[in-house]
Amino acid sequence: MRNLSLDFRHFSTLFAGSAAYFAWFWYFVGWRVEHLFLYLMILLLYYVHATTRKFVLAFGVFIAYWIIYDSMRVVPNYEVNPIHVAEPYYFEKNWFGLNTPDGRLTWNEYFKIHHTPFWDILSGLFYLNWVPIPLLFAFWLLRNDKLLFLKFSYAFVFTNIVGFCIYYLYPAAPPWYVEQYGFEVIHGTPGNAAGLLEFDKLLGLPLFAGMYQKNANVFAAIPSLHSAYPVLCLLYGWRLKKVWLNTVFAIFTAGVWFAAVYSRHHYFIDVLLGGAVAVVSYLAFEYLSEKTVLKKWFESFTAKI
């Protein structure tokens, strides 16, 4: 009788969760085929084997991150606060601008004129790995240090939530927007791969073009979360005291920061603030994870994964 009760509760929860998931994306976010693919993949992995079930439980926080990010379409940040287009551009030019025979340029403008195939490819490769490398690091931690895996994973999402809050407080246009539209505010502007299109052309594949067409928020340049992720890897990697790992993450950080500016997706100020968000979020999350109920929860959850 007790097993029947547990089964009923389990499938009732599954049904309710599934209904909420489909209703949310169908009526509010906007339904796309990847929503169905994600749902079926999670369902399959959860029920096919005990090992894959642990995988879903462990990486569930990354799934939650993706859902939160995609759900930002429901209320665009420019409906909450005005979009800043000219201010970041002029701040960048005044503080980080480059004097040239053609006048003072931002580094984004300079790289648009002086890009080369070598740097196009290199910056594209670094930018392609802004999610895969943190995920690979998470996989490695899951196998070698489950407690640190949990801290890194939840700190990753915590950092994103801090960044998302700033997006709504200060909507900001990226450099490529100024390049294409000037300082005029145009709501509903589609995403653009900007300098990363050179990578697509060289490879003959629309990798970045397809990726940025699905961008949930164009006016989210400050802070650069692309620049925050490698810093977070560096901070948690440092705790493992492995020289090779710290070297890899230091190169990864420098490469992504360079690519963000080179590809005209971010100003230097966006990159620096992205790094600052990662550091502040790391310190805040580590404090919370040691001083609150999270500490006991992390310790007990490690047994389930």
Image: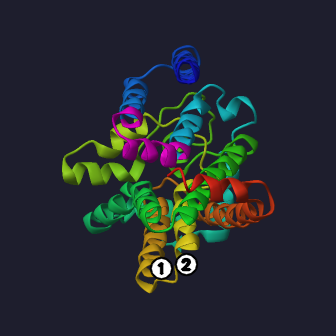
The percent coordinates of residue 206 (x first, y second) are 27, 42
Q: Which residue is mark 2?
A: 238
Instruction: Give x and y (percent) for residue 220.
Output: 61, 44
Of the pair 131 and 64, the residue shown nearer to us? 64
The answer to whether residue 151 is above or below residue 40 is: below
Residues rendered magenta in the picture? 45-61
Mark 1 surroundings within 10 Å by alpha-carbon count, few (fewer than 14), some (14 through 19), many (20 or more):
some
Q: Quadrant of residue 183?
A: top right
Are dots 1 and 2 in contact, CB under 8 Å?
A: yes
Q: Residue at x 80, y 57 (%)?
A: 292
Q: Is residue 236 above or below residue 191?
A: below
Quick check: can you spot residue 89?
Answer: no
Nearest to the observer: residue 205 or residue 107:
205
Pick the residue in front: 192 or 111: 192
The main secondary structure of the magenta stretch is: helix
Instruction: Residue 135 in the image: state x and y as whole percent.
Output: 43, 56
Q: Is residue 25 left or right of residue 135?
A: right
**Number of labelled discs?**
2
Q: Is residue 54 magenta?
A: yes
How was the colour assigned to the protein in this rendering?
rainbow
| Disc nearer the start of the sequence (1/2) | 2
* Quarter assignment of residue 74: top right
Amino acid type, label 1? Asn
Q: Residue at x 46, y 68 (%)?
A: 258
Q: Which mark is residue 246?
A: 1
Q: Is residue 280 left or right of residue 66?
A: right
Q: Residue furthest bottom?
A: 243
Secondary structure beneath disc 1?
Answer: helix
